[in-house]
Amino acid sequence: MRPEQNLNSHLLTVLVEDYFHVGAFDSLIQQRNWSNFEARYEQNTQKALDLLDEYDTKATFFVLGWIAEKNPSLVREIAQRGHEVASRGYYHRGLVNLSREEFQADLSRTNRAIENATGERVYGYRAAEKLNFRRDQWVLDTLAEEGMAYDASFMPTRKDEVSQRTASVFETPSGPIWEFPYSTLDVLAGLAPISGGNYIRQIPYSITKHAIAKWDKLAKGPFMFYFHVWELDPDQPRISAANLHTRLRHYRKLDKMEWVLRDLLKRYDFVPVERHLGLERAAAENTRTPEPAALSLALEEDRNTSDKREQTPVTIVVPCFNEQETLPYLAKTLAGVESELESLDYSMRLIFVDDKSTDATVETIRSLFGENENATLIEHPENKGVAGAILTGLRAAQTDIVCSIDCDCTFDPFELPKMIPMLTEGVDMVTASPYHKDGGVRNVPGWRLALSKGASLIYRRILNSKLDSYTACFRVYRRSAMTELAIQETGYHGVAEMLGQLDLNGGKIVEFPTVLEVRLFGASKMKTLSTIGGHLKLMTRLLKKRIVEPKARPNEPAKRSPENGQSL
């Protein structure tokens, strides 16, 4: 296994992952929610393929196993257009959190997904995070043990041997393996990365262009350049919950990568790593061919069985005010929720209540849900607030089980299949509680938590129901218990009034512990000072109602109208 002798050729590598996969967003985005995001990796990969075709250049594409399993046709196209397909790992996980056994399992799953798509053996690997020679060399032994030919994951430092700054062979207990480290330039402060990605976008190109030219002239090994396909997508959705440093790192100069790449493709010859090593493409072993006919038959049988079972209708009310950015994420989320509800014999109906949005919320709702015969859009002629929108949806619903969710998914709608069955006979409301001992909070500002917990503490003293949280919009209602309540407040504090009025009317309320997360897209519409003032006035009215008016017996069901009084 010897490299080609063309010293003028350098290595071009492309990382096939989406904007929501990147490590900078790990604390905000959970792997289980990846499928809820608007996927853009396919269109961005196609853009990269077309750009490379324009310059008659072939590259190594490091592909996430998650993508290879979900979209094998895209991975197959990469190979058919003459490029090498290598492994990026399955879940974009840092190896610091993986044992050797877990790493082997991740590697095996990714290789199998890629090889099933391309029919060709996988030779190379690049880790989700840059590795350290002194800490992570065990990875090379594991790769060699799995039959891999090379790795491209290590970032050299001044403390490493000079030979480790360029391509070199490592001898491991499982055999030799090539390492192609990130290209660096020796400067006064240390080794400066010049190999691509964020380094290319943030540093003036006049500097990096000079550095690459110096490498081309002096270095003994090939220059390693890389870019992510999402770096060709300046119009990608913005994760507004990220801190300023992360937003600058990820979004700044996204429009720069394409013209930098074009300039480099004009100046230098690039080849895939496998070609540099002189590796011949080989058929993969033990690949499996999908059986679409058998799979289709099984799905049809499941569908027919499901159709025979009687389903309970459930309405989900979604209050919307300037939620254009969040709706694509919500649409994918609701599609998954509907599937889970159907498996539990519930049928889902949707009511979107637009609260006089000033952006393209209405148009986006119609675009995403216009063909859904079970989706209804109601438009408020004037802004009423979140509670007002929920009440509009409740009154318009034609089912006795009605759920309300936050459009921004700060509470996970996938919890609804667990919450709805809690609306048993005699229960009028199931409300989400992040402050329950089994709940939690993730990435939410401390000042907001302090205000919410303080309000909940006071409501707990005023009302009969002793809950941990009283202000969450994420709920399941018995419609017949709610529509006759005299709710005065329609803003954020109106959500608490709905619970408070139901409580003082004798309704039964139970809590569901869940996790509250910061909203990913757009900005919160809550006006803090007016919301605090509204809660204080509401607390006074509820306390007066409890003291002055005849007390309802605790947990006594509220009166129900005959037509909606059916118990579950």
Image (cartoon, rainbow, N blue to C red):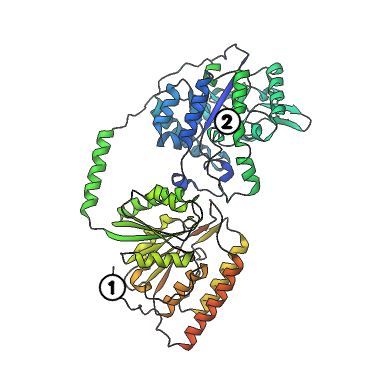
Percent of width and height locating residue 12? 57, 23
Is disc 2 surrounded by few (<14), some (14 to 19) or many (20+) residues within 10 Å? many
Q: In the rendered image, which residue does mark 1 sit on?
A: 565
**Point 53% across, 44% down: residue:** 237
* Horizontal side, residue 292 vs residue 54: left or right: left
Q: How far across and how far down the image is residue 223, in percent?
A: 63, 22
With 40 as the anchor, is 555 left or right in this view? Answer: left
Residue in front for this viewpoint, 8 or 162 = 8
Where is residue 70, by image quadrant? top left
Dot 1 lies on which element? loop
Quadrant where the N terminus lies? top right
- Farthest residue toward the top? 5
Residue type at mark 2 is: Phe
Query: Along the horizontal axis of the image, is 469 left or right of 70?
Result: right
Task: Look at the image and tell me whether residue 34 can be seen.
Answer: yes
**Residue 147 appearing in the image:** no
Residue where numbered disc 2 is placed: 227
Q: Nearer the viewer, residue 239 or 452?
A: 239
Q: How many marks?
A: 2
